[in-house]
Amino acid sequence: MKRKLLIPEGTKDYLQDEAYIQRSVVNKLLKLFSLWSYNEIKTPMLEKWDIVKKKNVYDQKFFSLLDKSGDLLILRPEITAPVARVVATHFRDHVEYPLRLAYAGEVFSQNSLKSGNKRQKTQVGIELIGAGSIISDCEVILMALESMENNEIKGYSLGIGHMDITIGLLNELIEDSETRDYVLESMINKDIVALENILPDEIKEKVMILAARNGGMEYIEMVRNFSTDDKFKIAINRLEVIYGILEDLGYKDKIFFDFGILADYSYYTGLLFEGYGNGIGIPILRGGRYDNLIEEYFKSKPAVGFAIDVDLYMKSMNCSIDLPKSQGVVETQDYIERFREARNAHLEGKIVEINLEDN
């Protein structure tokens, strides 16, 4: 009996059609980013743990290994922190900010395999370094929206949240840190039942409106007076301005506010957003602002960006990308002439096969 040649759980083989579609999607997105003046960089799949562990960037869901010198290495679970390291290493003195960077590559994590999660994913994304303005938030959000338009993502939409609204209000309402952490975890996991059971009655209504509801400007009006904290009010006003800009650009029906959006990584500081496609239960795109991360490596630089899960993105596409087909077979008797004909066809952009039979 033949032994099954199994691959690790949470990984997959990409055969011709799917591999071609994935490469086409990545190239098309990188082309879109280049039109916005974002140029691609590449970082290693392996990172030194003592470099990226700063500010508790990752939890313990990464893959790790020891090299011969005893250094602990990890397979990168995302690419934003490696980009921050690149900025600190290669762009300390030789670049004018803002810096616009794009990337595509594999990421690895030991997250639960439920809900479509995989151990190995292809990500493509952008990072805007050195700009903290409202217009920089709008640029990145517009790029996220165009990324979903780019391959006709079915029924796409973008949810927008803000750390200073959600975390700020929870810090104000819940004094006990353990309870607050449990509430945060339940919100991240969208566990509404757990929230209903743990929240005291006097704060339940406000927290449940953040955790379980979303909407347009009417939703902003609903939460506007939940807090008198300055950061909370500034965040509300900032989101209003962003909404007005996106509305005027024709995206009113594609965006909504959702203060239940919370990031998996601790480095996010303000704006958060997630992109969705019809029929996919988890976001195909995630992003946000991380103004304090780069100072852990270099010096203070505001930053914002997003990453696309390419496999989920492909499942949401409403257009087809077909594997190129051969346009003919070169069967000339003379072997050398076969290759000459094939080369000439290639120069004309034609796809041809060579007859590999000996005469």
Image (cartoon, rainbow, N blue to C red):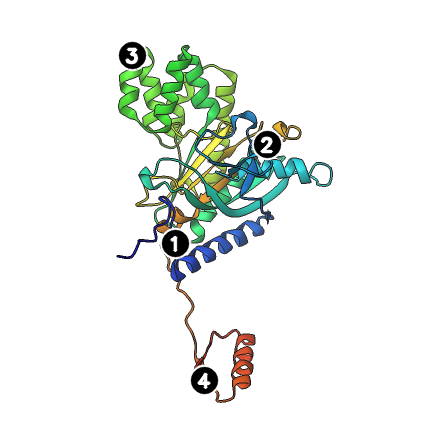
Q: What's the CA distance linking mark 4 and mark 3?
A: 83 Å
Q: Are marks 4 and 3 in contact (CB under 8 Å)?
A: no
| Residue occupying image coordinates x 43% and y 45% | 121
Q: Which mark is residue 118?
A: none
Label 3, secondary structure: give it.
helix
Residue, disc 3: 201
Label 2, secondary structure: give it.
helix
Q: What's the CA distance linking mark 4 and mark 1?
A: 34 Å
Identify residue type, mark 1: Asp
Identify residue type, mark 2: Ile
Q: Position of residue 51 (x, y in %)?
A: 59, 32
Q: What's the CA distance linking mark 2 and mark 3?
A: 44 Å
Total marks drawn? Answer: 4
**Dot 1 crowding, Cα within 10 Å, few <14, some 14–19, many 20+:** few
The tag earlier along the polypeptide, 4 or 1, is: 1
Label 1, secondary structure: give it.
loop
The tag earlier along the polypeptide, 2 or 4, is: 2
Residue, disc 4: 358
Residue, disc 2: 51
Q: Which of the pair 235/107 is nearer the observer?
A: 107
